[in-house]
Amino acid sequence: MMLTLLMLHADAQNKFFIDGYHGGFWGHYPVGYTGFIADKLEENSFWKINLEIEPVTWDVVQKNDLTNYNRFKTFVKDQSVKGRVEFVNPSYGQSYLFNIQGESVIRQFEIGIKTIKAHFPEAEFYTYSSEEPCFTSALPQILKSFGYRYASLKNPNTCWGGYTRAFGGELIKWKGSDGSVLLTVPRYETEALLQNSTWQTQAWNNSEAYISAAYRYGIQNPIGMCLQDAGWENGPWLGKPKDFTYKTWRDYMENTADKTDLKTWNFNQEDVQVSLVWGAQVLQKIAQNTRIAENKITIAEKIDAINAVANKSKLIGGKFDAAWQNLLLAQHHDSWIVPYNIVNKEKRWSWADAVTYWTDQSNHLCDSILNIADKNASENPNGFNVRVYNSQAYARKEIAKIQLDQRLTNPIVIGQDHKKVNTQLITENGNRFLLFEALAPALGDVHYSIKPSKTKIAKPITHISVKGNLYTFNNEDYEIAFNAAKGGIIESLIAKKLCNKQFVDQKSKRSFNEMRGYFYQDSTFYSSKDQVAKITVVEDGLLMTRLKIEGKISNHAFTQYITLKKYDSRIDVQTTVNWQNNAGIGQDYAQKSGWKANDLKKAFYNDSLKLQAVFPLNIAAQKVYKNAAFDVMESRLKNTYFNTWDSIKNNVLVNWVDVSDHDDHYGMALLNDHTTSYAHNETGILGLTLQYSGVGLWGRNYDIKGASQYHYALFPHRNKWDKAEVWSQSITWNEPLQVVTNNKEQKPSFSLLQIAEPGYEISSLTMEDGALLFRVFNANAVSNNLNLNFNIPIKKAELVELNHTKSQTLKLLKKQNGITAVNLPIPQFGLRTIKIYLQ
């Protein structure tokens, strides 16, 4: 009976294949290649292609190969279901998506689609598909808001960086954490990883084993896939079809795929099983540079919009487009997986070099628009004025910071109520800075004056006591003991406001904030606690206390700064390790540079041997939560460790990871300044990957050149992550209050809006066609009812999709004191964009 069924399937020729191209100008797209594609389309009328080509490629082709550019445009014009060309991934920089923040994911699509439409006005976007594992858990709601109807979770021929978990059959309902559902072709339950390969699944060529397994599972219309690298000269990947049909994804989804009895997949970030060379110095710098630029550009957009409304200027959008384009290219997947590859032959730039250039350009553009680069005002010894900006929709009382001219004596800070605020002078890298208490209104700004005076700032009672090798910090939040005899590790961390909870597992073999890794050239583990450290109290004042810890890991000197601030419950840690030569860290066997590509075991997979900052936690029955773009999930992993390609686990830390007890009474969140990996196992030790040095992908040696810098923060808390507002802690850490010098006419404080309920993020505030676009994300399970209270005259409010189409008109509720309220139901992990027309 089974044999008969298989024969019937074969006779019916109901096998299908997704062909097309992946790459582009920055990845790989030879001169004249557009003509090759057009030739093959003309020669093979049976052929349909799906395109994942960097949008900027078409700018280059139009300029340098106009004849073939126009030839190709004729094939694109038919965007009906019968058309032969479908754009399946328009993202501007072909990012992995799982490693960047939510607003960057949106801009990848927004700017990419805009660029493609400029060349191909007829282009439609129905199905998302990628040749690399370019997936993240929030995609269903993001794609649907851009007008997408379908998706594919396959990447059969380029799994170097990973693959999605196998689930289901012909078609499933991909359900995001906000409840959005997208019809999706998964990596089938039967789609096995290819033997003797570390980059393919069986679906790459419609093999007999793949098709037969699909039929046995009950898949009536199996489909394989390969988006060829642009530059390959195969034409149709499987040649002229004998028993299968080439399809666009849209054609397959609308005319072929069985849409009955579909399983729903509650997909989360751990279903994207991915691994990069986490801890490699080159990858750290790429991740740090892109995160800095991500944060800067979203803050700068908000400040620019606040200024425009406060000054009653025209709401002109597009100012930051060039900054975004640079950032989005820096997020290209190739920069993360082949950082050493040459991307600019003329300048001999590697991907890592290009990322440095792109992010520097993005940062410079943002600073120039806001005039932040102009320091003339702060260099005035007679004093100057500043405005303090708050990029979130809650009033914030925090410590602000401004650099001072060395000649400005005994500075004081005066608020717009003409009262002095508390201050503290500090020194960093030979420069003089002033800290001051700032109360910034929600999504707005406030004025302060900095002036010289005759009275010196009084030095308050110290927060640090010293007894032998123990340096103990005490304030209203914490009692923290640092042990110099053990390399400056944290021996005790008591949270006073949390019922004096001790967060350090003092019985563990490992120490809290210890740095430890396997140095394979010496065949031993080295730890920061192996040698005595020097501890110095660098700053200890009313607003901030900072300890400097100087120690060694083997013969490699490190300097660590522990900073605690008033009004801030986070414990901030910044570390620099001055590596001597290229220390080998993280390999458990003598892996050679000439390793075979099909070796399943790879040294860089095994985080247990990399240099980690470790945190043994006094938290019982531990469970782990972690964030991703517009999402938070509870981990299902018993431990995060693996060492082979076919056993990859998602151990990616995007912004934060949080360890809680079984009943969510207490937790410890770990925030990091860049995407990397984390570690956690059954012994209750949380780890942060700091350093790897050894063989990576394709046998490349990922070495260490000079110093490495690490920046993370610890946040002990009560209750589950949402009630503890861990997401908000991460946002305020990434988006601190911004101080901008301003000697123009000082105006009263200004606030665009406030949100009454906790746990919401303003992920974006931009200007468009004379209106304001607010994008709001709900990370709060307590309230699903959003109340936006605007302090500006509003003519009209609309709910709009990410593709800028109007969804509905929102009702305006007038309140006292000139406040106009907008109420909007929004589920947890929901994302909404509101367009505000001003009077």
Image (cartoon, helix red, strand yellow):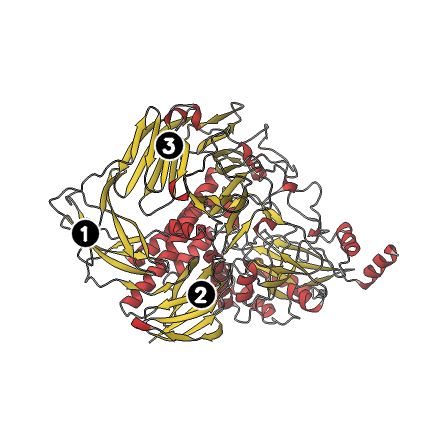
Q: In whole angstroms, how far apart are the C-alphas of marks 3 and 1? A: 34 Å
Residue 517 in the figure: left or right of residue 41: left
Left or right position of 256 against 706: right
x, y (%) of residue 58? 51, 62
Instruction: Please indicate whether residue 186 sits to the left or right of residue 464 in the image.
Output: right
Return the disc, 1 or 2, that comes first in the chain's sequence: 1
Q: Residues within 10 Å of mark 2 (few under 14, many from 20)?
A: many
Mark 2 secondary-structure assignment = strand
What amino acid is labelled 2 in the image?
A: Leu
- According to the picture, the residue beneath numbered tag 1 turns out to be 420
Residue hosting label 3: 481
Q: Position of residue 513 (x, y in %)?
A: 44, 34
10 Å crowding of disc 1: few (<14), some (14-19), many (20+): some
Whole-angstrom CA distance, mark 3 to mark 2, is: 42 Å
Seen from the viewer's position, the closer of residues 603 and 94 is 603
In x, y percent, where is residue 331?
48, 51
